Image (cartoon, grey):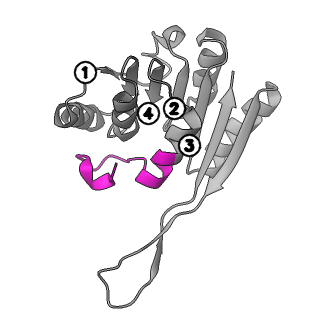
Amino acid sequence: MKDSAFIRGNVPMTKEEIRTLVLSKLELQSTDHMMDIGAGTGSVSIEAALALTQGKVIGIEHKDEAVDLIHQNIAKFQINNLTVVHSKAPQGMDEVSSCNKFFIGGSGGNLTDILNLIKTKGQKNSIVVVTAIVLDTMIKAYEYFKNNEVDFELIQVGVNKIDTSRKVAMLTAQNPIFILTAKF
């Protein structure tokens, strides 16, 4: 889905190119139950909910404006299998044991606690995808997976766009993103 399809406000959003990679790395099946931690505008949650025709998505978000935007996007796309939990993770992750796919787009500084909860209470062979724009977050996730002997992959993605409406073609860089994919 195009970024422009979502109601945005001033809340960070996983951009469409990164969202495409994240959804691919999650290997979603129609019956999966997914948790989106740090759901922001709900862009990943919405696209996942559309794919999970027999499954469900739980979006965890603590910022008031973001929770409101997720609800607006749920209404816009007429989603009925997405529940929003207004909480800062790991609080609010009560249904972690019912989920087998996890996307961490924001951890609020609680990445280790979130990963520990998923590792101990999530379903066996759960897939966890973490995006990191900040090096500290990437390093924390990398070290967690290494120290816990978790099988994982780490990629870095850089997307550049050209504004074709301008007279001259000039690359405009988006922030590089690290994507870590692990199986617990």
Mark 2 or mark 4, which is nearer the start of the sequence?
Answer: 4
Residue with the mark numbered 3:
131
Nearer the observer, 126 or 14? 126
Structural distance between the alpha carbons of marks 4 and 2: 8 Å
Q: Position of residue 138 (x, y in %)?
A: 65, 44
Q: Mark 1 touching mark 4, by CB under 8 A?
A: no
Helix, strand or loop at label 4? It is loop
Q: What residue type is labelled 1?
A: Asn
Q: What residue type is labelled 2?
A: Phe
Q: Where is residue 1 in the image (x, y as percent from the top left)?
A: 34, 48
Residue with the mark numbered 2:
103
Whether residue 9 appears in this view of the structure is: no
Q: Mark 1 touching mark 3, by CB under 8 A?
A: no
58 vs 134: above or below: above
Structural distance between the alpha carbons of marks 1 and 3: 26 Å
79 vs 138: above or below: above
Helix, strand or loop at label 3? It is strand
Structural distance between the alpha carbons of marks 3 and 4: 11 Å
Mark 3 Cα shell of 10 Å, populated few (<14), some (14-19), many (≥20): many
Whether residue 58 appears in this view of the structure is: yes
Structural distance between the alpha carbons of marks 3 and 2: 8 Å
Q: Position of residue 87 (x, y in %)?
A: 37, 22
Give the number of the disc on residue 80. 1
Q: Mark 4 touching mark 2, by CB under 8 A?
A: no
Structural distance between the alpha carbons of marks 1 and 2: 19 Å
Q: Mark 1 touching mark 2, by CB under 8 A?
A: no
Tell me which residue sits at (40%, 32%) in the image. Answer: 48
